[in-house]
Image: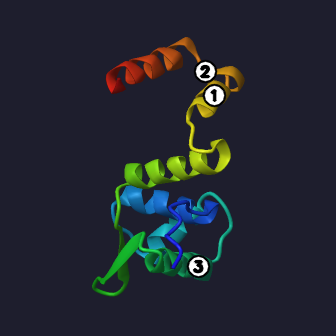
Amino acid sequence: MRPRNPTLTDQELEIMKVVWDLNQATVREVYEHLRAHRQIAYTTVMTMMKILETKGHLKKSQDERAFLYKPTKPKQQVIRGMVKEFIQRVFNGSAEPLLVHLVEDEGLTEKDLAEIAKLARRKS
């Protein structure tokens, strides 16, 4: 059996961000939030949330009239797993090329660089 891939698709991540922000949500609440930003079908949201439940990212419980979905893992834990998977896949497990890319190509400010240096000093 293949290990679970921590990386979420774009649409899954979009839904998870809504649920994380709300701490718990019904399909209707997620749908309304997403619909405010773009066109999406209610059934698409419902299907995606069922997939996220199957993958272990959401857990549902019965509320008065609807299912209530809660995240099974904190946002930071999921993002950390996605970043590790990205570094492994793209940079063969080394974070240094990613940092070099960010510094050279992404126009980080002096403040950004100072914060990165501060975090690096705390880790060592």
Tally the marks. 3
* Residue at the (41%, 73%) spot, across then down: 56
Q: Quadrant of residue 12?
A: bottom right
* Lower position in the chain sequence, tag 1 or tag 2: 1
Task: Mark 1 and mark 2 in contact? Answer it, CB < 8 Å.
Answer: yes
User: Which image quadrant is residue 36 in?
Assistant: bottom right
Q: Is residue 8 above or below residue 119?
A: below
- State which quarter of the image contains the C terminus: top left
**Could you tell me which residue is drawn at 57 percent across and 44 percent down?**
93
Question: Residue drawn at (62%, 57%), measured in percent from left and top?
Answer: 37
Q: Position of residue 110 (x, y in %)?
A: 55, 12
Which of discs 2 and 3 lies nearer the camera? The answer is: 2
Report the colour scheme: rainbow
In the rendered structure, which amino acid carries the disc numbered 3? Tyr
Q: Which label belongs to residue 108? A: 2
Vertical side of 16 occupied by 62: above or below: below
Q: Earlier in the sequence, mark 1 or mark 3?
A: 3
Numbered tag placed on residue 42 in the rendering:
3
Asked if labels 3 and 2 touch by Cβ distance under 8 angstroms, the answer is no
Give the numbered dot on residue 102.
1
What is the x, y in percent for residue 70? 34, 69
Mark number displayed over residue 9: none
In three-dimensional space, the C-alpha distance between marks 2 and 3, rounded to whole angstroms, equals 39 Å
- In the foreground, 33 or 12: 12
Vertical placement of 20 versus 80: above or below? below
Assign a secondary structure to mark 2.
loop
